[in-house]
Amino acid sequence: MKKLTDAQKLVTKIVMVVTMGALAFGYDTGVIAGALPFMQLPAAQGGLGLTPLTEGLVTSALVLGAAVGSLLCGIVADRLGRRDSLMGLSAIFVIGALGTSQAPTVPVMVLMRAVLGFAVGGASALVPMFISEMAPPGRRGRLVSQNEMMIVTGQLIAYILSALLARFSGAPGIWRIMLLIAAVPACLLGLGLVFVPRSPRWLASRGRADEARHVLELIRSTDTQVHREMVEIRAQVNDDSEQMGWREALGETWIQRLLMVGIGLGFAAQFTGVNAFMYFTPIILRQTGLGTEAALIATIGAGVVAVCATFLGIWMIGRFARRFTLMGGLAGVICAHLGLGATLLLMGGAPSQSVVALGFILLALFFIQMMVSPLYWLLMSELFPMRARGILTGLSVAAQWVFNATVSFLFPVVLHWIGAFTFFAFAVINLMSLVFVARFLPETKGMSLEKLEQYLEDHFSPGDSRATHAGGKPVCYMGTGGR
């Protein structure tokens, strides 16, 4: 095995620190499943006396806060930098964790969950962006995908710790400990960032080229790599200075089209049903006659599958094209939804229905976490130009959180309304997503961010009806004719 250089080791350490934000993201989104049953208890018994309405408010407050956080933090990151913005978010994570764990009433809990959501949304936008700007082109895919690995790891940790605390502690207020644990990765993020350099691309965009070169000298293995990247960064900064800032950028047709692709990818990622499975697997399985305790154990199984699949996804990203991987994942998700719908529709009353249904749920999660979710976060870190990367990433990720809230809110209602046909509807939506990716998403693998920016500008600019992938295959412009 090839030995890593000091620069490569430093980049790996930077990624480990920064993805503490993704770990906090995952834990905070997963822990609520274990805390809610205890929060439903009356106040006299250590709970908050949640009703179905207030339970929905507590759950959705984080998602809505995340939509706001991803948008505003994208704007702030363009002004203050990626690292310093993440340091601010680490403090907000801690405030949110302390606030939710000590909340005396439902309104305070909803408010603190929204604060926590703001940090979750900000981290979801900034962590992949920061990693992509620090990583060399050849390692960018795998390193950015560590973000997804840490998200699903955080969710799995939340499921396991919640189950253990609930099993071995008789205290009715144990939910407060569950929520307080979220402060641990937040503190690690804030402390670790003190030793992490700023993004060289952001430094160069603020006219601090000497500092940018110094950072590159720390995180690149050879002087040739440093020189080549500095030439590309300076050329891009000079080009961006002529085109002004992000407000002017949003008026350019090619960037508007790119933004539509980013928002479309968020739709595709969320309408795989990933959070319908992560949040509501027990509800689905109870329809097959499975008991509540067994259904909760199955949720831990879903978390294990998500972690294993993400690990395989990181391996795949280093070897296969982005479009190919994403399209393959969507095709697998379609098959899983069709299988799950058929199981619920045709196997009613069969002893093996619960096992088969769980198998298709885990198959869907396997494809999603291996070939869809990691690709989504990676593409969010690659697609957008430097001068507007923060705001464009923020807008796209904010839309993704809105789609998340839409699926999470509608899924139980639709499942109750049309039952098994819910999953046939998911299959149709994912088929549309597959067509969208095949039609509009260009390949991004293997190029520096600066070369990729120029390629995407050529690809999405009005004019010719054709563009060329990095690999030489023709692709369509958005809004133009066929291949």
Image (spheres, helix red, strand yellow):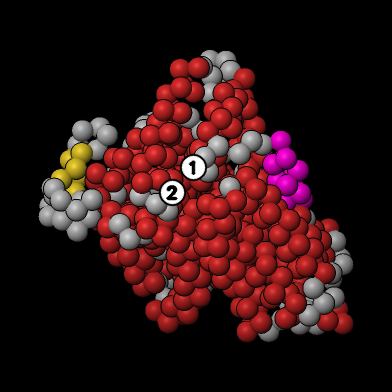
- Which residue is at 76% across, 82% downward? 49
User: Is 332 above or below relative to 264?
Assistant: above
* Residue segment shown in magenta: 184-195
> What kind of residue is marked 2?
Arg
> Dot 2 lies on which element?
helix
- Which residue is at 23% across, 50% downward? 461
Crowdedness of circle 1 by 10 Å Cα count: few (<14), some, many (20+)?
Answer: many
Crowdedness of circle 2 by 10 Å Cα count: few (<14), some, many (20+)?
Answer: many
Measured in 3D between alpha carbons, the distance from the residue under mark 2 to the one under mark 1, in whole angstroms, is: 7 Å
Label 2 close to label 1 by CB (< 8 Å): yes
Is residue 283 at least partly visible in the picture? yes
Q: Earlier in the sequence, mark 2 or mark 1?
A: 1
The picture places residue 28, in percent across and down from the top left corner, at: 66, 59
In reply to whether residue 194 is colored magenta, the answer given is yes
User: Circle 1 sits on which residue?
Assistant: 205
Q: Tell how many labels.
A: 2
User: Circle 2 sits on which residue?
Assistant: 387
